[in-house]
């Protein structure tokens, strides 16, 4: 199918291509968030009547991440739905190094201690003491917790890759207080549905403000803090990589830029 043909499709033909796109994304187990993004972008492309390069240029004034999303969405569409090579080879600029925001242990303790709601307290503790991602906390089930072996078996990790994380003694204590006789998801709303992303984001935001933290604190900030504090305590970076579930060690190495044990050592030389 040539570009000119794509530009002249009927609504019914567009819908068929979008349905095929949805199928291909499901077969490859893409995350819901990525799938929604690809579907929206490809649909916008089909409705625009533009060729790929023209459509990409619409996003040239936006952020680098937006440009990358469009590029990869169109490439996926061409390669897997149209079964064609994606001929555009635009230079995708490397992401600039943006250092993660890290909280001190004191700040994290303040957040935990100032929280009266035990469920909210546990959310903070899983994000920090296990270094979990937001979605991993949402999808955590009671059957994933092994108190005897003191581990968490993550079965819904990013990229559909399972991993094992240690179960910190403070989490064990809090889980026993919370009650471990339940089934299904650990964090459920009053309607017995698992927490949505917004709920967890709001919990972290409101508690960090309550204790007077001026930094922009998100659920991922606690994961960053987990990794940085381990590194500062002398943990091997490859073990940290495994705990975080990073495919590439380079992703984990960003924490070497914010870990301050070596910076402190240099300060002592003055």
Image (spheres, rainbow, N blue to C red):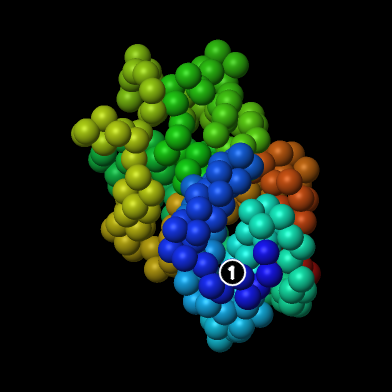
Secondary element at tag 1: helix
Is there any visible trace of residue 270 in the rendered image?
no
Compared across the picture, whether 35 is left or right of 244 comes to left
Is there any visible trace of residue 83 in the rendered image?
yes
The front one of 38 and 153 is 38
The front one of 61 and 169 is 61
The residue sitting at 77% across, 51% down in the picture is 249
Q: Position of residue 201 (x, y in %)?
A: 37, 53
Q: Position of residue 214 (x, y in %)?
A: 40, 68
The front one of 26 and 64 is 26
The residue sitting at 63% across, 75% down in the picture is 4
The residue sitting at 63% across, 31% down in the picture is 162
* Quadrant location of the N terminus in the rendered image: bottom right
Residue ranking furthest to the bottom? 61
Task: State whether residue 179 is above or below residue 93.
Answer: above
Task: State whether residue 221 is above or below residue 115.
Answer: below
The residue sitting at 47% across, 65% down in the picture is 10
Q: Where is residue 99, by image quadrant?
A: bottom right
The front one of 63 and 85 is 85
Q: Position of residue 89 (x, y in %)?
A: 77, 74
Crowdedness near tag 1: few (<14), some (14–19) or many (≥20) residues, C-alpha within 10 Å: some
* Quadrant location of the C terminus in the rendered image: bottom right
Numbered label tally: 1
Q: Position of residue 138 (x, y in %)?
A: 42, 39
Compared across the picture, whether 93 is left or right of 195 comes to right
Task: State whether residue 153 is above or below residue 73.
Answer: above
Compared across the picture, whether 112 is left or right of 170 comes to left
Q: Which residue is mark 1?
A: 6
Compared across the picture, whether 27 is left or right of 257 comes to left
């Amino acid at each position: 199918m040539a570009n000119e043909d794509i530009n002249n499709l009927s609504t019914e033909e567009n819908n068929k291509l979008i349905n095929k796109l949805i199928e291909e994304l499901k077969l490859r187990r893409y995350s819901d968030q990525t799938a929604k993004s690809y579907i929206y972008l490809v649909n916008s492309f089909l409705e625009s009547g533009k060729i790929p390069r023209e459509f990409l240029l619409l996003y040239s004034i936006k952020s680098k991440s937006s440009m990358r999303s469009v590029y990869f969405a169109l490439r996926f569409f061409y390669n897997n739905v149209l079964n064609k090579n994606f001929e555009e080879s635009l230079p995708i600029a490397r992401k600039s190094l943006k250092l993660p925001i890290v909280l001190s242990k004191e700040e994290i303790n303040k957040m935990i201690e100032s929280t009266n709601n035990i469920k909210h307290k546990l959310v903070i503790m899983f994000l920090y003491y296990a270094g979990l991602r937001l979605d991993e906390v949402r999808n955590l089930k009671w059957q994933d917790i092994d108190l005897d072996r003191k581990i968490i078996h993550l079965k819904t990790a990013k990229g559909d890759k399972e991993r094992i994380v240690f179960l910190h003694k403070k989490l064990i204590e809090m889980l026993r207080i919370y009650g471990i006789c339940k089934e299904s998801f650990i964090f459920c709303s009053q309607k017995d549905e698992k927490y949505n992303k917004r709920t967890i984001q709001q919990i972290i935001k409101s508690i960090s403000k309550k204790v007077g933290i001026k930094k922009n604190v998100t659920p991922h900030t606690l994961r960053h803090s987990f990794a940085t504090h381990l590194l500062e305590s002398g943990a091997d970076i490859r073990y940290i990589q495994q705990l975080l579930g990073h495919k590439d060690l380079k992703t984990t190495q960003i924490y070497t830029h914010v870990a301050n044990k070596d910076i402190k050592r240099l300060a002592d030389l003055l």
